[in-house]
Image: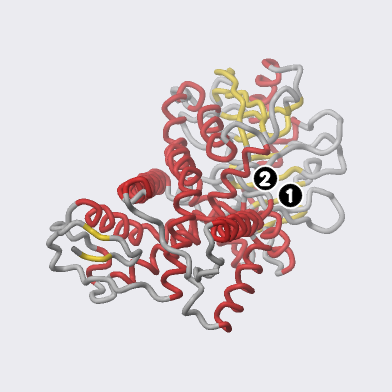
Amino acid sequence: MTTTPDGQLDPPVHTPTTTPAARPSGPTALLRRLHFYAGIFVGPFLLVAAISGGLYAIAPSIEQLVYRDHLHVQPSGEPRPVAEQIRAAQAVRPDLTVTAVRPAGGPGDTTRVLFDDPSLGESERRAVFVDPATAQPVGDLAVYGSSGALPVRTWIDHLHRNLHLGEPGRLYSELAASWLWLIALAGVCLWVVRRRASFARLFTVDRRSHGRARTLNWHGAVGLWIAGGLLFLSATGLTWSHYAGDNITELRAALSWTTPAVSTALSGPAPTADHDHHGTHGHSGGGTPRVDEVDRVLRSARDAGVGGKVEVSIPSDDDTAFTVAQTREPWIMSNNAVAVDGTTGRVTDTSWFTDWPLAAKLAAWGIQLHMGLLFGLVNQLALAALAVALVTVIVRGYLMWWRRRPTNGGRPPARGAWRGISPVTIAALAVAAATIGWFIPLLGLSLLGFLVVDGMVGLAKGRNIFGGAR
């Protein structure tokens, strides 16, 4: 029989490559207890986030198949003027105000004319799809966010973000993102301590092990393989959260790391705008959109160096410039934008990706990578594989707990983790926890709640919170 670091007995299994672990020290015991309880209680949220996130990762490819009749047409000649295509879309939806257009990116693609539709939800617009060669509409759909997600991807996005529960549902995803990085780091540390005798064995599974030992092998090795990806998903996911996301936005603003944006005012300072897949677009004012000037604006933007697929915003007053911005496309590492005076075709402001602060560039790439857009199908398959791997790690974690559940004679990591840690280290950990908890509020509040409940349970059982007899 062998003794595991949590003090439990393993079945008599011959595992010659596994070094018996000693009773964990103070810091290791603390990590073990944190990893164990965080995994147990946050695991369901992570499981839902992993499954829905994996579906969202491949959603761009799914919508290309589901909506192929809206997105693609048989090439039949040179494209008509964009203004003519917009007029054709307006004939379909005369009740709505056109706000932007995404001209066809190439032969066989449709033009997407975007309308402000009050009947839709936040960040949603109505899109009429037009055959650019014939200027004939081929259908209309609701689209969501700056990525232009179509209904299937939008549904999966809302499932991943808030479980279709609205603003209160966002607490689930923020809680998952808040804890993911901490659980992953704690797990890596525990696995390294357990396998410290051989670096090569950190990434391998002992196939001669059986039962819980084999499950632990897979849990630890796979967790280590995907740890970097989990840290990335946690960091980028928090940028879209409510409470931690607000703190991140304030920090970026204080450090001048915000994403530059062109000024649409024909005079005045340029604003800043951090676009994500929940961003909105629109035009200024309440007049008639200046559709007839779109082709002139588009030519000026092309001449200025804005290439690839773009979205042209359409203002409704003479004091507002058009904006021509590159849309997020696979393998396109820049998001250039220009503002153009529609009356004269003069470029009035520019935002070149090469001039962005490094942090703004990294944020833009991180957003696209998280959404599965930066590297196309390769990106999507990698995220889907990461999601599947995370699901297996979570399931194996619960399987280990089930085999050692209290009703089956097992017990969780014992209290007393603080013993053996120096007062200076405890003070440093307390300060770090308070700082992180303030910056990531759901992490701080849930951790505080656990400590309070755990302390009360310990007192009720006749032991103090440090594990000693009262």
Mark 1 element type:
strand
- Is 43 placed left or right of 278 in the picture? left
User: Going 59% across and 23% down the picture, which residue do you hit?
Assistant: 141
**Type of the residue with mark 2:** Val
Residue at numbered disc 1: 339
Q: CA distance from mark 2 to mark 1?
A: 6 Å
Task: Specify whether residue 147 is in view.
Answer: yes
Where residue 397 sits in the image (x, y, percent)?
36, 51
Question: Residue 2, located in which quarter of the rendered image?
Answer: bottom left
**Which is more toward the observer, 89 or 276?**
276
Which of disc 1 and disc 2 is earlier in sequence? 2
Residue for point 52% across, 58% down = 461
Along the line of sight, the residue nearer the viewer: 28 or 114:
28
Q: Give the percent coordinates (x, y) of residue 463.
A: 53, 64
Neighbor class of circle 1 (other Cα within 10 Å; few <14, some 14-19, many 20+) is many
Residue 202, compared with residue 222, is above or below; it is below
Residue 384 appears left or right of 21? right
Image-based side of 394 in relation to 290, left or right: left
In terms of secondary structure, where does tag 2 sit?
Answer: strand
The answer to whether the residue labelled 2 contacts the one labelled 1, judged by CB atoms less than 8 Å apart, is yes
Q: Nearer the viewer, residue 310 or 413?
A: 413
Question: Which numbered tag is attached to residue 35?
Answer: none
Mark 2, residue position = 324
Q: Say which amino acid is labelled 1.
A: Ala
Q: Is residue 403 left or right of residue 327?
A: left
Residue 89 position within the rendered picture, expressed as x and y whole percent measured from the top left: 66, 21
Assign the C terminus to one quadrant of the image: bottom right
Q: Position of residue 119 (x, y in %)?
A: 72, 22
Q: Residue at x 62, y 55 (%)?
A: 449
Against 461, is 301 above or below? above
What's the colour scheme?
secondary structure
Residue shown at 46% from the left, 29% from the top: 108
